[in-house]
Image: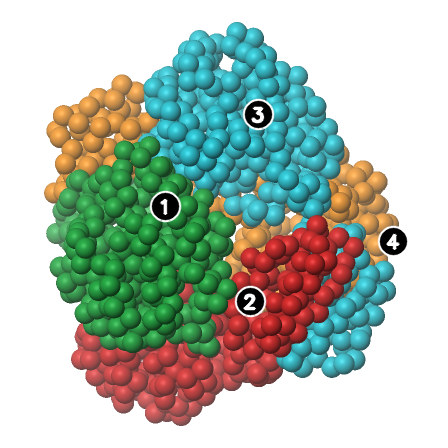
Chain colours: A cyan, B orange, C red, D green
């Protein structure tokens, strides 16, 4: 934390701020400048809310220097993270020189629908399958997902094709079931600051895919991940979406933008892609507009592999 | 819904879109213009996701006309809503010619702290008291609230001063308890799209104060309220915050901005104000920076009463 | 400027950054913390772009402490500014305990229109009159303003009613004429970072009303004002608009929102209001949607006077 | 334009709106729905501001259907545009299966600096050279560019290496000179809505590179281009920047983000790249932080060529 004093602040005001800092058990480092004095603070372990210093006489503002997160910081772990997701057909690696592709429908609608899509995407070499059994829809009148029967369908497709399954949990109750049936627990963008749910995910034994809130800052996104890590679960994947790319399906909401944005995501250095595929998008119960066809997905995987190769990476 | 065709769309493409609309059980109304044709759609009850029309040949875009909400719409209830909140000291009215003031600390920290603040704000005539027992903090290392013991303290202050109590629920478990102890259930900004929590609040027997998500559009805000109403609870108050005013405390995060924004909120026509008051803000366990002192709150109520009077309204 | 080092930065890296700072003629103040070292910099007069320090080994980020503006800063002038605008009927004061009202049509359309509106608003006691002769319209096919003949109409209305005239300049050529005919030179939101125009306004002998760009940060807004002041013109009024209030007409684009937002602007502490009034808004050549009727303006002035009085201020 | 009526609107109110539409010389198409009536309007050539309909009794809102631009629309020209920029070493093509690379320093600082950089980037096959002689800096205390002497240096480098030159004009005076010396006239992001400058560029005989304003919507961006085209200059290139990618240098302001974003821009389908290169970025008079080194630029061109090839395109 750095406390910036007014240019007209008196020596006494500077002294009073320093004393207040020391009284909080911290150390004050005054830096007198030509125009104004700034006061550096060290020794803060995040336990004290220093914002109150801003109301002391002579103070212009308090500038935070340390980040509020610890475990997700490069200070705690300097190198890039590489995740290993166990699946029935062996581990899938996310990060390092490996890129992971996840494909499947937005929502689980029926066993027929899920198997029809699974049969098609498996041909492109995909090993992680997605599909929502719980849908956090903005309208209470929209399809809300099949619930546990949907999870059972995903379990069948998992057994049949050897996929790892990624599916969303929307509250503590559904997270219990998702943890039981799936290989990766997804936390959606609208729940990115549902701290009760994040803490429950932190106590889960499965990796977590955390989507960025539509307008979340990077710090807020990392703090949400910190919530999961602080409970003991260190296997967290961060997934961009919203106005920013990398969840190309939800990021644009337009089918014809999925392919170019998928290429761009890999070109910019993403470790993976989460793509909605549906064999009959016009009949999809949710997000049909942004689902691509299996043959478009095959083209996507071809181009993405070539671009990954330019960066010396392989899709797995 | 209005479907806009390309200027170069053929008559056949227009016909195909109309047929598709009719095949969905709806009615198509082609409007041929000088440059392009648009096609109006009627008969849609929200059951069909018309976005898929956007991928038909010759279509430029689909413009939604109907709003996705029903119960919160002026179509369902044309006049302004007036809420009645039962409290031990009689009903408090929100809306119409009545303005409601809610005051109290950000967080319940101890019985001493809550009573010290209650004794002070009651002198300004406040009849609704706030204080958080569950705090959805962005950092897992910050004070998370006292939980049920905090609710018990609020119950005591309610019995002693005759206040109605407003306090936040952060998941289904805490909502059960808040419904039992408090008079109004608060849903915080970060949970504005926690649909599981909204539906639970919709089954509660107490009024709901719903805060607007930091970047929520008006339609998203209204849809969140719709979620509550759709389960049967029609007593919902909408509370602005974030980059927009009317929760002056959280809206700015700066103590000296609370008074001018409170005046502005009433001047612009708000039905109430939710203000954080603390007798020792420097020692507050959360949000001390934006809490005002009891004597500042007394000045606030004076000015707010005068401005309400310009609009022919009374504070109650 | 504060340079934040990585937690793993070596002593040598810290030393190298300090040496680099000193080599730029500045002073380095290392502040060793428990996790990382930060380095304060003093002696910078804005001549050196310190961003390059960010690419030195071991550096995480550079946090600016000093603001980039000088003349508009409270460091240069601590007290609130009070402007005095000479008009044919005596000075109008903006600031301190005085609030100024500016009214008139969006665009000057004809002598008849301008006089019809002037006759009506003068009855509400307005002494500053607005009306655009140069219109920076987003469409090249919209009415672009009357140009100099429009300025001549404003000069007539000035002579007849004793108004001070505020009107917009859109390039160096039009600014020459506006400076000649008007009492206040307006720079519109879209030209807020037209630095060539700002510098020309800085050499003008008349006060400048500078509108905030639609998404300009406060620092960008102040830097635009700094551009005017740096050329010698210290009489600058800052005018909010866009997503923020205080130019209630352009701020909302909706006629029925002008009154409540005008009340809120005065309640929050604004020094003045700029309101579009038109006696026949349906026939207005531009911005008819947001112009209010003269009788609505009379009601606005009444309410605004009463709210100003709550703050112990008078409208002049 | 579509006029949406309240659900409670009377038949008389609908009739009155239709009559008003017809009185404006347009045609009204009422579409009665189950909940409300909407009224389509045809025959509008952009001459009438239909917003005034919004204030008629019974109207909820007016939804624009036609876009405000004409010449830049796919209605006027359905196929993708391909630009041809004449240079001393032959034409450079932008669009179709050709991608164009533009490189050079942010600002022209001296003949030595410009030649040092030119010698290096020409080795990567670059044929379009950039460098600012007029710098629209946010601070009046920053380097403002060399002016015409800077343009003369660019003319020399043009003659020596056969480059086409792209450089920015900031007002009508500088545009006269830029048109004389350069091959492409750049309009910067902060001038995107400087309509006076746009119109002057529209009367120029050289192609225009128009940068998107930092928060401009796509429609505003296209309207700015329309301003140029409406004066007769159809050779306009649109350049993304700001929070969006494709001007990788100014888009991020961070040197190490230039390479990944350049790859992403080509992967997503951009027709060209504008990159700041400096052989001594630490000494650059402006934007040193975001300039890359010549050897980094060489790597960038290699990767960009490979990614373009995945899309069956060639860099020229």
Q: Answer with left or right where residue D245 lies relative to residue D237.
A: right
Q: In this view, does C34 lie above or below A7?
A: above
Q: Mark 4 packing: few (<14 Cα in 10 Å), some, or many (20+)?
A: few
Q: Distance between the residues labelled 1 and 3?
A: 30 Å
Name the residue carrying label 1: D301
State the mark number for residue B112: 4
Do labels 1 and 3 touch, CB within 8 Å? no
Residue C151, quarter of picture: bottom left
Q: Where is residue A246 in the image (x, y as percent from the top left)?
A: 47, 36
Q: Mark 1 packing: few (<14 Cα in 10 Å), some, or many (20+)?
A: many
Query: Disc 4 is attached to a residue of which chain?
Result: B
Q: Is residue A68 above or below residue C210?
A: above
Q: Answer with left or right where residue A68 lies relative to residue D114.
A: right
**Which numbered disc, 2 or 1, marks the residue closer to the eye?**
1
Discs 2, 4: same chain: no
The structure residue drawn at horizontal position 28% and vertical position 78%, both measured from the top left corner, is: C172
State the mark number for residue C50: 2
Q: For this rendering, which residue is in front, B132 or A73?
A: A73
Query: Disc 1 is attached to a residue of which chain?
Result: D
Name the residue carrying label 3: A93
State the mark number for residue A266: none
Q: Distance between the residues labelled 2 and 3?
A: 40 Å
Do labels 4 and 3 touch, CB within 8 Å? no
Answer whether residue D123 is visible to the viewer in this image. Answer: yes
Do labels 2 and 4 touch, CB within 8 Å? no
**Which numbered disc, 4 or 3, marks the residue closer to the eye?**
3
Query: Disc 2 is attached to a residue of which chain?
Result: C
């Amino acid at each position: 934390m750095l406390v910036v004093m007014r240019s007209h602040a008196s020596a006494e005001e500077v002294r009073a701020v320093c004393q207040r800092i020391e009284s909080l058990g911290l150390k004050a480092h005054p830096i007198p400048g030509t125009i104004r004095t700034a006061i550096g603070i060290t020794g803060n372990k995040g336990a004290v809310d220093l914002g109150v210093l801003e109301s002391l006489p002579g103070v212009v503002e308090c500038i935070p220097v340390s980040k509020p997160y610890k475990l997700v910081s490069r200070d705690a772990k300097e190198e890039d993270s590489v995740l290993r997701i166990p699946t029935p057909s062996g581990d899938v690696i996310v990060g390092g020189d490996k890129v992971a592709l996840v494909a499947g429908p937005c929502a689980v609608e029926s066993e027929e629908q899920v198997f029809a899509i699974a049969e098609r995407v498996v041909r492109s070499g995909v090993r992680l399958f997605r599909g929502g059994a719980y849908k956090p829809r903005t309208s209470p009148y929209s399809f809300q997902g099949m619930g546990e029967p949907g999870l059972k369908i995903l379990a069948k497709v998992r057994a049949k094709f050897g996929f790892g399954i990624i599916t969303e949990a929307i509250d503590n109750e559904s997270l219990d079931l998702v943890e039981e049936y799936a290989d990766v627990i997804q936390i959606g963008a609208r729940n990115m600051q549902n701290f009760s749910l994040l803490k429950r995910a932190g106590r889960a034994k499965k990796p977590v895919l955390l989507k960025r809130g539509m307008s979340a800052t990077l710090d807020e996104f990392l703090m949400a991940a910190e919530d999961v890590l602080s409970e003991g679960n260190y296997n967290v994947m961060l997934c961009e979406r919203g106005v920013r790319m990398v969840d190309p399906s939800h990021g644009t909401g337009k089918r014809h933008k999925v392919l170019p944005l998928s290429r761009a995501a890999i070109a910019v250095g993403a470790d993976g892609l989460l793509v909605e595929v549906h064999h009959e998008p016009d009949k999809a119960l949710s997000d049909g507009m942004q689902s691509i066809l299996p043959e478009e997905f095959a083209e996507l995987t071809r181009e993405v592999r070539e671009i990954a190769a330019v960066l010396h990476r392989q899709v797995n």
